[in-house]
């Protein structure tokens, strides 16, 4: 009941064309054969007409009976027909054209394939060179960044290197605060968690990068939390001059990698619980020194010093 249907043979367009061509060839050959038979009968008839029936017996050309010329003329047409069937149609007929076309198409196909292969090869080379250029540019950029980025420590330290007590600054020097504001404005400021907590609120127009070991430490939005000094520097790599702003623990770690120190030396000794590391003059050279007298707003003398790594 649900037996398989007999498959109906399908003939595609090409096959149909081939069959039509074959049929045409058969017809051509048949016509040639009929022509040949008619020619033989016709030739016999022409000879008989002249010799037996005496038609045009007196009509001769160059002393040769007319039927000879008639048969020769007919023979010429037959040879022409023969030539058409076996030469012209065989070599330049539809089948020949098709074969030539197929050859051309095959050649074009080969050419397309080789072009495709060349194209893929070139694409690979371009992709490789792009990856190469990209990595070259990237390493160049990172070198440039490393070169350009100037990691700067900014600190105010007493003569005895005191910097803080009870998580607070020990003195109030308004020009020092102004200088801090001017230098760090628009930059990344990297600090330890304790220093961050010594501020009443984040400082305006600076990107705060706070270092803590606490994984669940909560900070206001916009503050970048990191868990090492390396990560803090990494988080500030878009900045040409990120600042290390303290406190004692972070200064200690940053001394080995910083490029510059902007120091406000307060010319006085203080009791403290947090100190700035000693500046090793074999490593650092002083490049600027501006002395400031004490006045109504400043209880102590102080100097603005710049150190650059030798
Ligand atoms: N005079 C100045 O110019 C100046 C400038 C800034 C600060 N200060 C003073 O310095 C004092 C604060 O300094 P401080 O040394 O006590 O504290 P701090 O350096 O500001 O912060 C220390 C905290 O930073 C985190 N930390 C440090 N190293 C870390 C590391 N390698 N990986 C991950 N987290 C790390 C820890 O946070 P967790 O405990 O959360 O893990 C650590 O408790 C205050 O008195 C402040 O007023 C003075």
Image: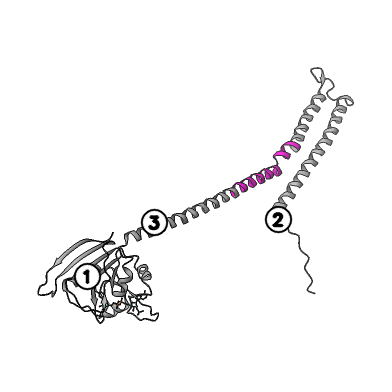
To which residue does mark 2 refer? 12
Crowd around label 3: few <14 · some 14–19 · many ≥20 (10 Å): few
Which one is in front, 14 or 246?
246
Q: Nearer the N terminus, badge 1 or badge 3?
A: 3
Which one is in front, 154 or 112?
154
Q: Any mark on residue 140, and which? A: 3
- Please tell me in which quadrant of the rendered image residue 54 appears: top right
What residue is drawn where x is 73% and y is 59%? 10
Q: How many marks?
A: 3
Is 97 covered by the magenta stretch? yes
Eyeballing the image, is 234 above or below 94? below
Q: Nearer the N terminus, badge 1 or badge 2?
A: 2
Q: CA distance from mark 1 to mark 2?
A: 87 Å
- Note whether residue 208 is visible: no
Give the colouring mode of the picture: one colour
**Secondary element at tag 2:** loop
Is 143 covered by the magenta stretch? no
Ligand 1 resides in the quarter of the picture at bottom left
Q: Any mark on residue 180, and which? A: 1
What residue is drawn where x is 59% and y is 49%? 112
Eyeballing the image, is 13 above or below 79? below
What residue is drawn where x is 52% and y is 54%? 124
Eyeballing the image, is 254 above or below 102? below
Q: Is residue 270 left or right of residue 150?
A: left
**Secondary element at tag 1:** helix
Q: Position of residue 33 (x, y in %)?
A: 82, 38
Q: Position of residue 47 (x, y in %)?
A: 86, 27
Range shown magenta: 86-112
Q: Any mark on residue 309, and which? A: none
Q: Nearer the N terminus, badge 3 or badge 2?
A: 2
Q: Position of residue 310 (x, y in %)?
A: 28, 59
Eyeballing the image, is 99 above or below 291? above
């Amino acid at each position: 009941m649900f037996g398989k249907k007999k498959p109906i043979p399908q003939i595609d367009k090409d096959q149909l064309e081939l069959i039509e061509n074959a049929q045409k060839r058969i017809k051509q050959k048949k016509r040639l054969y009929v022509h040949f038979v008619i020619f033989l009968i016709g030739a016999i008839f022409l000879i008989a007409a002249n010799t037996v029936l005496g038609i045009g017996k007196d009509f001769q050309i160059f002393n040769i009976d007319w039927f000879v010329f008639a048969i020769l003329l007919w023979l010429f047409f037959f040879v022409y027909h023969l030539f058409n069937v076996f030469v012209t149609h065989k070599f330049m007929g539809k089948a020949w054209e098709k074969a030539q076309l197929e050859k051309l198409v095959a050649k074009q196909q080969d050419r397309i394939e080789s072009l495709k292969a060349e194209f893929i090869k070139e694409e690979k080379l371009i992709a490789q060179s792009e990856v190469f250029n990209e990595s070259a540019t990237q390493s160049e950029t990172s070198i440039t960044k490393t070169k350009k980025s100037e990691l700067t420590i900014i600190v105010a330290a007493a003569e005895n290197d005191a910097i803080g007590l009870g998580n607070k600054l020990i003195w109030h020097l308004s020009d020092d605060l102004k200088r801090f504001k001017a230098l760090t404005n628009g930059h990344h400021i990297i600090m330890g968690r304790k220093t961050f907590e010594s501020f009443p609120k984040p400082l305006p127009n600076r990107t705060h990068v706070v270092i803590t070991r606490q994984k669940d430490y909560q900070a206001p939005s916009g503050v970048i939390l990191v868990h090492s000094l390396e990560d803090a520097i990494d988080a500030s790599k878009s900045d040409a001059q990120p600042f290390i702003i303290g406190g004692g623990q972070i200064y200690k770690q940053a001394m080995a990698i910083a490029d510059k120190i902007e120091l406000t030396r307060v010319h006085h000794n203080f009791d403290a619980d947090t100190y700035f590391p000693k500046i090793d003059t074999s490593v650092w050279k002083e490049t600027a020194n501006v002395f400031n007298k004490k006045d109504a707003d400043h209880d102590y003398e102080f100097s603005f010093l710049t150190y650059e790594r030798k």
